[in-house]
Image (cartoon, rainbow, N blue to C red):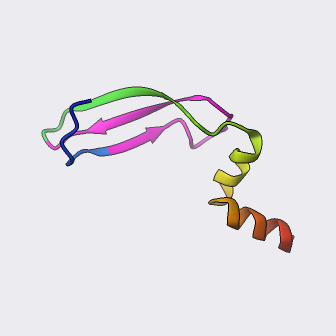
Amino acid sequence: LNLIGDETFDISGIDGELTPQQDVTLTIKRKDGSSQNVQLLLRIDTPIEVDYYRSGGILPYVLKELVG
Protein backbone atom coordinates (compact mmCIF):
# COMPACT_ATOMS: atom_id res chain seq x y z
CA LEU A 1 0.00 0.00 0.00
CA ASN A 2 3.06 2.29 0.30
CA LEU A 3 1.71 4.13 3.35
CA ILE A 4 3.85 6.92 4.82
CA GLY A 5 1.52 8.24 7.52
CA ASP A 6 -0.04 11.37 6.03
CA GLU A 7 -2.84 9.64 4.12
CA THR A 8 -6.54 9.89 4.87
CA PHE A 9 -8.91 6.95 4.55
CA ASP A 10 -12.56 6.65 3.53
CA ILE A 11 -14.64 3.48 3.65
CA SER A 12 -17.59 3.34 1.28
CA GLY A 13 -20.35 0.78 1.29
CA ILE A 14 -21.34 0.96 4.97
CA ASP A 15 -23.93 3.74 4.82
CA GLY A 16 -26.93 1.85 3.46
CA GLU A 17 -28.02 -1.71 4.03
CA LEU A 18 -25.30 -3.49 5.96
CA THR A 19 -24.85 -7.25 5.80
CA PRO A 20 -22.29 -9.46 7.52
CA GLN A 21 -19.07 -10.02 5.57
CA GLN A 22 -19.97 -7.75 2.69
CA ASP A 23 -17.37 -6.18 0.41
CA VAL A 24 -16.51 -2.52 1.03
CA THR A 25 -14.08 -0.13 -0.64
CA LEU A 26 -11.25 1.62 1.18
CA THR A 27 -10.08 4.80 -0.55
CA ILE A 28 -6.60 5.96 0.41
CA LYS A 29 -6.11 9.66 -0.34
CA ARG A 30 -2.55 10.96 -0.48
CA LYS A 31 -1.28 14.51 0.04
CA ASP A 32 -0.15 14.72 -3.59
CA GLY A 33 -3.80 14.37 -4.68
CA SER A 34 -3.57 10.77 -5.83
CA SER A 35 -5.83 8.07 -4.47
CA GLN A 36 -5.96 4.29 -4.38
CA ASN A 37 -9.02 2.05 -3.96
CA VAL A 38 -8.70 -1.26 -2.13
CA GLN A 39 -11.48 -3.86 -1.87
CA LEU A 40 -11.94 -5.16 1.67
CA LEU A 41 -14.05 -7.79 3.39
CA LEU A 42 -16.10 -6.17 6.14
CA ARG A 43 -15.40 -8.03 9.39
CA ILE A 44 -18.80 -7.54 10.86
CA ASP A 45 -19.50 -11.25 10.88
CA THR A 46 -22.97 -11.73 12.39
CA PRO A 47 -26.35 -9.95 12.32
CA ILE A 48 -26.01 -9.01 16.01
CA GLU A 49 -22.68 -7.31 15.23
CA VAL A 50 -24.54 -5.21 12.63
CA ASP A 51 -26.89 -4.12 15.43
CA TYR A 52 -23.92 -3.31 17.70
CA TYR A 53 -22.32 -1.23 14.93
CA ARG A 54 -25.56 0.65 14.18
CA SER A 55 -25.97 1.41 17.91
CA GLY A 56 -22.45 2.78 18.27
CA GLY A 57 -21.04 -0.23 20.13
CA ILE A 58 -22.00 -3.01 22.48
CA LEU A 59 -22.57 -0.82 25.56
CA PRO A 60 -24.97 1.62 23.84
CA TYR A 61 -26.80 -1.38 22.37
CA VAL A 62 -27.20 -3.05 25.77
CA LEU A 63 -28.30 0.19 27.45
CA LYS A 64 -30.86 0.79 24.70
CA GLU A 65 -32.20 -2.74 25.16
CA LEU A 66 -32.45 -2.29 28.94
CA VAL A 67 -34.28 1.03 28.68
CA GLY A 68 -36.64 0.22 25.91
Answer left or right for 34 relative to 23.
Answer: left
> Residue 60 is drawn in which quadrant?
bottom right
Q: Position of residue 18 (x, y in %)?
A: 66, 38
Quadrant placement of the N terminus: top left
Answer left or right for 26 relative to 59.
Answer: left
- Residue drawn at the location 19% of the way across and 33% of the way down: 34
Front residue of this view, candidates 68 and 16:
68
The verdict on residue 20 being magenta is yes
The verdict on residue 33 being magenta is no
- Residue drawn at the location 73% of the way across and 38% of the way down: 46
- Residue drawn at the location 29% of the way across and 29% of the way down: 36
Please give the count of numbered marks on the rendered protein: 0
Residue furthest to the bottom: 67
Q: Is residue 13 above or below residue 55?
A: above
> Residue 56 is drawn in which quadrant?
bottom right
Answer left or right for 44 relative to 66.
Answer: left
Q: Is residue 68 above or below residue 31?
A: below
Q: Which residues are magenta?
A: 9-31
Q: Position of residue 58 (x, y in %)?
A: 69, 60
Q: Position of residue 68 (x, y in %)?
A: 87, 70
Front residue of this view, candidates 43 and 51:
43
- Residue drawn at the location 83% of the way across and 65% of the way down: 65
